[in-house]
Image (cartoon, helix red, strand yellow):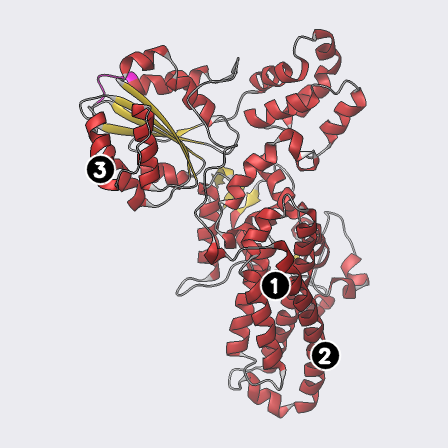
Amino acid sequence: MEGALIEVVLENLNSLIREELGLLWGIEREMENLSSLLSTIQDVLEDAEEKQLKDKVLRNWLLKLNAAAYEADDILDDCTTEASQLQNKHQTFIKRLLINPAGNVLFRHKIGKRMKAVIEKLNAIAEERIKFHLREIGDRMAVKVDETRETGSILTQSSIFGRDQDKERIIEWLVDETREGEHVSVLPILGMGGLGKTTLAQMVFNEERVAQHFDLRLWVCVTSDFDVKRVLKEIFESATRNGSGALKLDSLQRSLQDLLSEKRFLLVLDDVWNEDQDKWQRLKDVLACGLTGSFIIVTTRLEKVAIIAGTLPTYCLSGLSEEDSWLLFKQHAFGQEPKEEARLEKIGREIVAKCGGVPLATKALGGFMRFKKEESEWLFVKESEIWNLPQGETFILPALRLSYHNLPFEMRRCFAYCSVFHKSTQIKKEKLIHLWMANGFILSRGNLEMEDVGNEVWNELYMRSFFHDVRKNDFGDVTFKMHDLIHDLAHSVMEGSRSSQQILLRDHYLSLPPVTTTLILEDPSKFSRLRVLDASRQWGSFTEVPSVIGSLKHLRF
């Protein structure tokens, strides 16, 4: 969230220097200093954002940086506002400065003092970053497969609930001798993190009917490093149970084709994030040598991956039913203790409801509760948000954060902002895009207006399984929801930078409750930094717009 904010502040800053403040006495130099400082810090922000999850000192550094970024953004907004007030259709900002020098000297003096203060803060923050050994984005090495994420074909769970029907549907596809199609068919299994895509693929992979139907079964955990040669190498090693040594790409391709030709094979590519169509096509061209009826199963969180890879309709995995979720939870929470189950079942079912049918969360919370015997402890968990529970013991949000960190850097702030909505809210797509615009999270790009860019961002988040339950009414208005765990993820991102949340909700965002209030009318100075004023729940309470709103010069929505 912090890095994305600095990025957009920097973009606004550079635009402002070019268009409006190029000749403003002395301030140009300060603006350039500010721009240079932000650029220096920006280069290491992505590395810092990932490391801060495990480093409290680094997290505090990001908090200070974030607060300074908001101050810088306010200064830029003040400059833009001043420019727009001085302009008219026929006179540039600089001409107006010359016409009214006295007023502009006062403005220049005030803005100069504020800018000097924020530059001093950013200088100190920039010097501090050295001790954290942060890498610049351009210096990053290719991401290696995280051993904690690596999967295999062996099904290690003793009992699985609620997936038999899913398993049977997929097996029917795999063993259907009458179906005609390509030599190698690709079936994507799509769903949010923790939904059980890997477990389902393991169930299918180990089914006796599947083992008998295919000459060869192969499993490769792909994760974020979709290097074609690496994936081919792992497929080859899975097929031969031997290392491929230092084979060149051409030799590797030919050796693999020799192994797969005239065979009906099943290949599972687990946890795929690659959105590069060219890479996928290069891989598929090598694998197209199998007999008709060969299959590739791709598990992914990204709809775009499913569209690129799939030759068959995507299998969208849904959450567990309420009863299956309870069976899974109680297995991990109670074991062979029926007395404890009877005593704590009512609270336990309410805890299960927090998981929204996601097996990972259900199982993790069940294990978390295993040694908690007091009713007060169960009530505490029931009333807590998942993002407030110990992450080292539940492992829920770390698994979901993979989706967040896989987002393009500039989209992270847009996702995190969704935490301002209440859980289970049916959110209006158009309103959310306008809120992103109001906060400066999206900018026009080339011939695209801000609304168009916002629509692209929303579509990307939807295709990455962050949004669901999309509806469209007769008037064309689109609404959607966020899964409760995804909402918790957005909160955890904001909570990871508590000052971000406080500034966003206290200084930049105000939603008036559905009762008449004079809060903003009594002391508008408290809301001088307000970007968004949502009075939609006050509909009918105002007969006219209060004039005091005109003094809120940062207000955009």
Amino acid beneath label 1? Arg
- 44, above or below 553, in the image: above
Left or right relative to 532: residue 223 = left
Determine the residue located farthest toward the left in the rendered image: 262
Which sits earlier in the primary sequence, circle 2 or circle 3? 2
Nearer to us of marks 1 and 2 is 2
Q: Describe the element under mark 1 as helix, strand or loop.
A: loop
Left or right relative to 373: residue 16 = left
- In the image, the segment drawn in magenta is 175-179
Which sits earlier in the primary sequence, circle 1 or circle 3? 3
Q: Which residue is mark 2?
A: 110
Name the spot of residue 131 as percent of width and height, x first: 64, 57
Name the spot of residue 159 as percent of width and height, x first: 53, 13
Q: Residues within 10 Å of mark 1 (few under 14, many from 20)?
A: some
Left or right relative to 457: residue 359 = right
Q: Which residue is mark 1?
A: 556
- Whether residues under marks 2 and 3 lie with C-beta atoms below 8 angstroms apart, the answer is no
Name the spot of residue 265 as percent of width and height, x first: 27, 22
Q: Which residue is mark 3?
A: 251
Q: Describe the element under mark 3 as helix, strand or loop.
A: helix
